[in-house]
Image (spheres, rainbow, N blue to C red):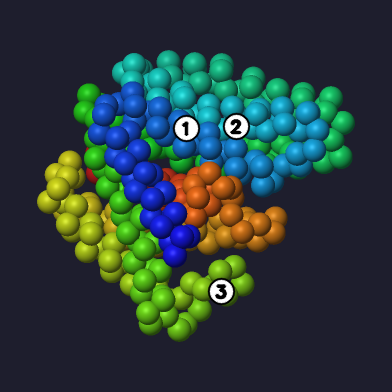
Amino acid sequence: MQGLWRRLVTAVIFVIIMAAGHLTGPYTFALLFLIIAAGCLWEFLGLTLDLHTRRDKIRKIFGVVLGLLPFVLVTILKLMKVIDPEQFITISALLFSPFVFTIFIYELYSNSKEPFANIAFMILGLFYIGIPFALVNFIAFDGDEFRNRIVFGLLVLTWVNDTGAYLTGSAIGKTPLFPRISPKKTWEGTIGGLLTTLLFGWGLSFLFNDIPVTQWLGLAVIVGIFGGLGDLVESMLKRSVSVKDSGNLLPGHGGLLDRFDAFIFVVPFAAAYLLYFR
């Protein structure tokens, strides 16, 4: 019972922080997702890199900074309304490329037993976490318009899909979805999550009219498919390093990566979908 209350209190505080970050303006929105991205990268690198010495901890910081670069560059582009793509690409290349190659130089002097494995994991963090969070800004900032409600709606759909899948799977789930990675997930739960997400997507179209109902339903389908896959991918990661949770920042819920694994996987597909209509 105590564990249930702890999960509930954590969830309420978490939702309040997320809502405040979304609804108080573009700068707090950017700061919120910068913190979340940094936390997810920190946990991911904590799972994948060897952390025994001071040099290992410096490597971890290197990886977090590298992973945050796309988000920081896109945030500057959007907040400062830099509209010249050629100028942005030039500035990004000048800032980004040299920093990427500094991790090779660092590994040259780190005396690590697996230097290229370290480099690979840092670059993986960039693509797995850094770029999806950078794409959040492309969804939220549409020219002079700040469409933060679409991102908030996408988060709500992701949470609804996870909850709907859990409740349906617990009630009637019998057919394993992917027993090798996640024995408790079922096809019935996945379908229940998708149907629940479609229902909420339809409902969100009345609350947030930034996009039409058809696009909300399209986002619901994307969440229903790729949200579950994102959860499986993180389960595969945790199984590969023999841990239950990515961290312990959120009592009763694990780490930030545990909470945002599905959202991270959904964002690239949702961004491509929305930008196509724009």
- Residue 2, given in percent of the width and then of the height, sits at 46, 60
- Residue 178, given in percent of the width and then of the height, sits at 54, 72
Look at 64% across and 20% down and name the residue there: 98
- Residue 275, given in percent of the width and then of the height, sits at 30, 40
The residue tagged 1 is 35
Q: Residues within 10 Å of mark 3 (few under 14, many from 20)?
A: few
Residue type beneath disc 3: Pro
Secondary structure found at label 2: helix
Residue 225 vertical placement versus 110 (above, below): below
Q: Is residue 124 visible?
A: no
The residue tagged 3 is 183
Secondary structure found at label 3: strand
Q: Nearer the viewer, residue 26 or 254?
A: 254
Residue type beneath disc 2: Val
Residue type beneath disc 1: Ile
Look at 14% across and 44% down and name the residue there: 209
Dot label at residue 267:
none
Query: 228 left or right of 197?
Result: right
Mark toward the start of the polypeptide (1 vs 2): 1
Q: Mark 1 to mark 3: distance in Å? A: 32 Å
Query: 30 left or right of 116?
Result: left
- Residue 171, given in percent of the width and then of the height, sits at 37, 79
Q: Residues within 10 Å of mark 2 (few under 14, many from 20)?
A: many
Residue 245 vertical placement versus 176 (above, below): above
Between circles 1 and 2, the one closer to the viewer is 1
Image quarter of residue 226: bottom left
The residue tagged 2 is 64
Residues at circles 3 and 2 in contact by the CB criterion of under 8 Å? no
